[in-house]
Image: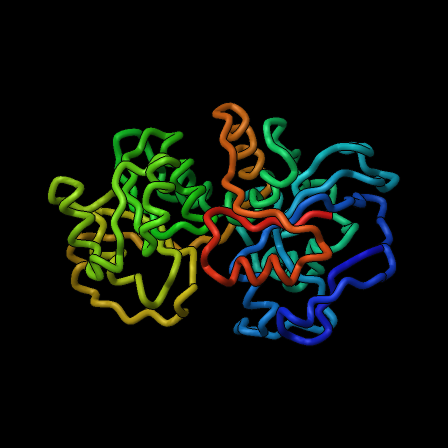
């Protein structure tokens, strides 16, 4: 089968190879990959910037979709031709995450989805939404599910609240779409004049250019009647966490889901304690939650934002587009 194999770290070393097709166990499903979506952690894996080691050779990329090619002798839930979402945490069916689940992450300890075929457990595959193309559905298992579980399961968002959405990456665009689905007011930030109108077109009620307002928490409060927002998802880490905490009201929710500017946090505890702010770290979710997300996407006809689509032969160009920071929406790779 064809696969993108990383034998040395660096985007320039992503090479299309012919490798053996993996064998399928009796409770497993052979999935033919149709589309994969690039995430920030895929970039830092390829560039060897992860805090833990990645064994080489390695097939990267964590989120994607495919079509069932073959099933094991005891598989009953799936048949050849079914469209499915490939799980990120391979065996997390329901309930809380465990150390066992955490060991089995697609694109990290397990081979990623930049391969013509992957083998998946029967019970954590989830059907692809009927209203989405393969390219549109590719980012659901990581970016989309992380936002869904953070906002719906952890923050318990509800109509009438206000959310601050940071930046215009795939996670943040999902946050706008899910927040509007639930009836929230959305304040978004961006450093790009060009992207301000795109964020409004997607559903943002107000947009702040953080280059014009470096202490953007003050502008957040001005746009929200002098008070902080109910919820924000911090996507950058080191450089933004202080402003995230200052942007929420008493008993506000700050979801910690990104690390684009670093993993070390130095914060003033006073506003955190006096405002009873809840900091909640979270990563993706289980198959049951992904199925709930799929149902919501279909019912509300949500269409994830796709920036560009590259064929597998142009995977290096796809990573360069992603790394440029110019994309608005997801960068997709197709087989």
Residue 34 against residue 38 in the figure, above or below: above
Direction top: furthest residue: 299
Direction left: furthest residue: 226
The x and y percentages for residue 12 are 65, 71
Q: Nearer the viewer, residue 59 or 283?
A: 59
Q: Nearer the viewer, residue 119 or 315?
A: 315
The x and y percentages for residue 229 are 23, 44
Q: Nearer the viewer, residue 138 or 199?
A: 199
Residue 185 against residue 317 in the figure, above or below: above
Q: Is residue 103 visible?
A: yes
Image check: 20 left or right of 238? Answer: right
The x and y percentages for residue 9 are 64, 75
Q: Is residue 96 visible?
A: no
Image check: 103 left or right of 313? Answer: left
Residue 85 placement: quadrant: top right
Total residue callouts: 0
Residue 59 placement: quadrant: bottom right
């Amino acid at each position: 089968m064809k696969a993108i194999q990383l034998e040395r770290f660096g985007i320039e070393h992503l090479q299309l190879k012919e490798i053996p097709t993996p064998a399928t166990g009796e409770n497993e499903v052979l999935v033919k990959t149709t589309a994969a979506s690039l995430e920030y952690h895929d970039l830092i894996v390829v560039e060897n910037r992860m805090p833990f080691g990645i064994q080489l050779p390695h097939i990267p990329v964590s989120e994607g979709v495919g079509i069932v090619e073959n099933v094991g002798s005891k598989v009953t839930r799936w048949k050849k031709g079914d469209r499915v979402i490939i799980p990120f945490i391979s065996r997390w069916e329901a309930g809380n995450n465990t150390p066992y689940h955490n060991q089995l992450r697609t694109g990290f300890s397990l081979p990623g989805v930049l391969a013509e075929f992957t083998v998946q457990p029967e019970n954590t595959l989830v059907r692809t939404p009927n209203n989405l193309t393969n390219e549109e559905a590719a980012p659901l298992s990581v970016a989309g599910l992380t936002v869904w579980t953070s906002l719906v399961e952890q923050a318990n968002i509800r109509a009438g609240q206000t959310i601050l959405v940071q930046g215009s990456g795939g996670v943040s665009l999902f946050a706008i779409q899910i927040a509007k689905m639930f009836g929230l007011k959305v304040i978004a930030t961006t450093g790009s004049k060009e992207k301000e109108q795109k964020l409004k077109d997607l559903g943002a009620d107000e947009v702040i250019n953080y280059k014009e307002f470096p202490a953007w928490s003050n502008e957040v409060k001005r746009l929200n009647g002098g008070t902080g927002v109910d919820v924000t998802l911090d996507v950058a880490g080191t450089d933004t966490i202080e402003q995230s905490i200052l942007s929420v009201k008493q008993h506000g929710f700050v979801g910690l889901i990104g690390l684009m500017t670093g993993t070390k946090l130095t914060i003033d505890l006073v506003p955190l304690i006096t405002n009873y702010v809840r900091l909640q770290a979270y990563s993706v979710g289980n198959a049951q939650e992904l199925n709930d997300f799929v149902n919501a996407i279909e019912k509300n006809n949500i269409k994830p934002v796709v920036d560009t689509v590259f064929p597998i032969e142009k995977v290096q160009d796809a990573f360069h587009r992603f790394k440029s920071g110019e994309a608005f929406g997801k960068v997709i790779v197709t087989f």
